[in-house]
Image: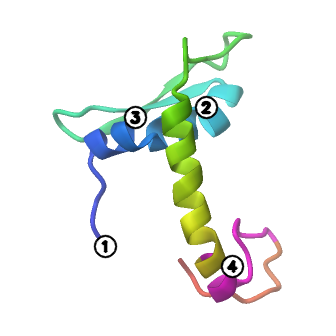
Amino acid sequence: MVNITAKEMRESGLLQEVNRQFFHPIGLALYVEEETNNMGVLDYREDAEGVTFEKPSVEKATNVSKIQQARMIERVRALGFWIQPLDHSTEHHSV
């Protein structure tokens, strides 16, 4: 296992997309500090509008989609799912 850098998180679009698709709609914002590679989550849940990007990058979103597509077939073949189901009665390998 290798750690991903803050720079790679930003440049690849992963930070944008995890925020745009998950954190922002629930009023949170994940951030990473490039200098220290530390990360944290800002809480805007009390703000009715939450957080949005002024102009999200289509290029970054497309890149993340390509990353997902490249991994999807192999992951589904190996585990039987793309997103881990909540059904605990089915045994799958821990990831």
42 above or below 81?
Answer: above
Name which residue type carries label 1: Met
51 above or below 60?
Answer: above
Question: What secondary structure is found at the residue carrying circle 4?
Answer: helix
- Which mark sits nearer the N-terminus, 1 or 2? 1
Q: Which residue is at a point 50% across and 35% down the rendered structure image? A: 59
74 above or below 57?
Answer: below
- Where is mark 1, residue-wise? 1
CA neighbours of label 1 inside 10 A, class few (<14), some (14 to 19), many (20+) = few
Q: Which residue is at a point 35% across and 38% down the rendered structure image? A: 11
- Where is mark 3, residue-wise? 40
Question: Given contact means CB atoms under 8 Å apart, are the residues at marks 1 and 2 in contact?
Answer: no
Name which residue type carries label 2: Arg
Foreground tag (3 vs 4):
4
CA neighbours of label 2 inside 10 A, class few (<14), some (14 to 19), many (20+) = some
> Which quarter of the picture shows residue 12?
top left
What's the magenta region? 75-86
- Where is mark 2, residue-wise? 20
- Which mark sits nearer the N-terminus, 3 or 4? 3
Mark sitting on residue 76: 4
- Which mark sits nearer the N-terminus, 3 or 1? 1
Please state the horizontal and vertical placement of residue 2, each as a whole percent of the image: 27, 67
Separation of residues labelled 1 and 4 (CA atoms) = 21 Å
Question: What secondary structure is found at the residue carrying circle 1?
Answer: loop
Separation of residues labelled 3 and 4 (CA atoms) = 31 Å
Foreground tag (1 vs 4):
4
On whether residue 76 falls in the magenta region, the answer is yes
CA neighbours of label 3 inside 10 A, class few (<14), some (14 to 19), many (20+) = few
